[in-house]
Amino acid sequence: MGERELIIVGAGPAGLSAALYASRMGLDTLVLDRGLAGGLLLEIPRLENYPGFPEGISGPELAKLMVEHAKGYGAEVRELEEVVELQLSGDVKEARTRKGAYRAKAIIIATGSFHRKLGVPGEEEFRGRGVSYCGLCDGPFFRGKRVLVVGGGNAAATTALLLADLASQVFLVHRRDQLRAEAVLARRLAEKGVELILNSELVEIYGDQLVRGVRIRNKRTGEVRELAVDGVFIQVGEVPNSELAARAGVAVDERGYIITDHRQRTNLPGVLAAGDVTNHPVKQVATAVGQGAVAAVEAYGLIRRPYWFR
């Protein structure tokens, strides 16, 4: 049974920020993640709105810097060690993995989110055979081919821009009459020759061994058209990865996001949450980092009880 002062579940931007602040304040801090440290940062081709990087920085590069920074102050980051059960009701919290169990006086849940699926015919059948949720991971496989991106936000626009430098032709389909992406990204889509298909929705993905095409319905006319493509990149948002916390008694809202107050406290004493798994309305790397810092300071107060803590 590993004894720590603080356990952080999740090594995305929120978890790594919390690890940095907590370890720098002297807390014996353990970070556990089922995957590689960085979370969805590892799938972002380029961040152009993270403070301090006017020329932009890739998600993997930023994740590497965050991990090194947290480890530099003594945080222990364990990758590929998934937490399968949480016990949060007592004064001492417990996180169980398949490798062991760890106890701490406080815990921060920073489990982030996972990609939302469309639920259309062919999506599951062709996953990994033309259907992808990560342009940075799979884009190079579609060099010189025709691809479709689904979505209208910054993630979809960024993915389409990345693919525009690889694929022979990039289409972007969005169900509304205008994109939700930032104006600067929308301008770049036009400059890169990305063809927008607005007021439309993807209704089917088809092929043989690999994706060969899609069917798209115009929401105004009801007309269904076929489009020959080799790849489909789905970027329609995320779903909070909160099931583990909810099973342990952490309160979530109607959409599954963990409910926190302005100090990142949940309904359970000694249990904090930060990042995309929470009900904070803005889902950005910068806000996740900020929430992680707040959660770490709160955890320090709970554990060490300094004179100023209330």
Image (tube, rainbow, N blue to C red):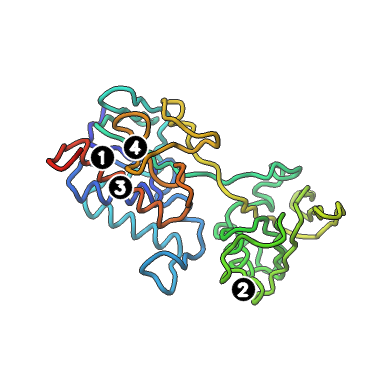
Q: Distance between the residues labelled 3 and 2?
A: 36 Å
Q: Distance between the residues labelled 4 and 2?
A: 40 Å
Q: In this view, does 304 lie to the left or right of 298?
A: left
Q: Indicate which disc, 4 or 2, sits on the residue closer to the N terminus.
A: 2
Q: Give the secondary structure at mark 4.
A: loop
Pick the front one: 190 or 46: 190
- Residue at which label 1 appears: 299
Pick the front one: 74 or 207: 74
Image quadrant occupied by the N terminus: top left
Q: How crowded is mark 2: few (under 14 residues within 10 Å), some or many (20 or more)?
A: few
Q: Evaluate if marks 1 and 2 touch, with contact meaning CB atoms under 8 Å apart.
A: no
Q: How crowded is mark 4: few (under 14 residues within 10 Å), some or many (20 or more)?
A: many
Q: Give the secondary structure at mark 3.
A: helix
- Residue at which label 2 appears: 187
- Residue at which label 4 appears: 265
Q: How far apart are marks 1 and 3 (CA)?
A: 9 Å
- Dot 3 amino acid type: Val
Q: Distance between the residues labelled 4 and 3?
A: 10 Å
- Residue at which label 3 appears: 294
- The residue that appears at 30% across and 50% down in the rendered structure is 293
- Dot 2 amino acid type: Arg
Q: Give the secondary structure at mark 2.
A: helix
Q: In this view, does 91 lie above or below 59?
A: above
Q: Indicate which disc, 4 or 3, sits on the residue closer to the N terminus.
A: 4
- Dot 4 amino acid type: Arg
Quadrant in the picture for residue 139: bottom right
Q: Indicate which disc, 4 or 1, sits on the residue closer to the N terminus.
A: 4
- The residue that appears at 41% across and 29% down in the rendered structure is 250
Q: Residues within 10 Å of mark 1 (few under 14, many from 20)?
A: many
Pick the front one: 52 or 214: 52
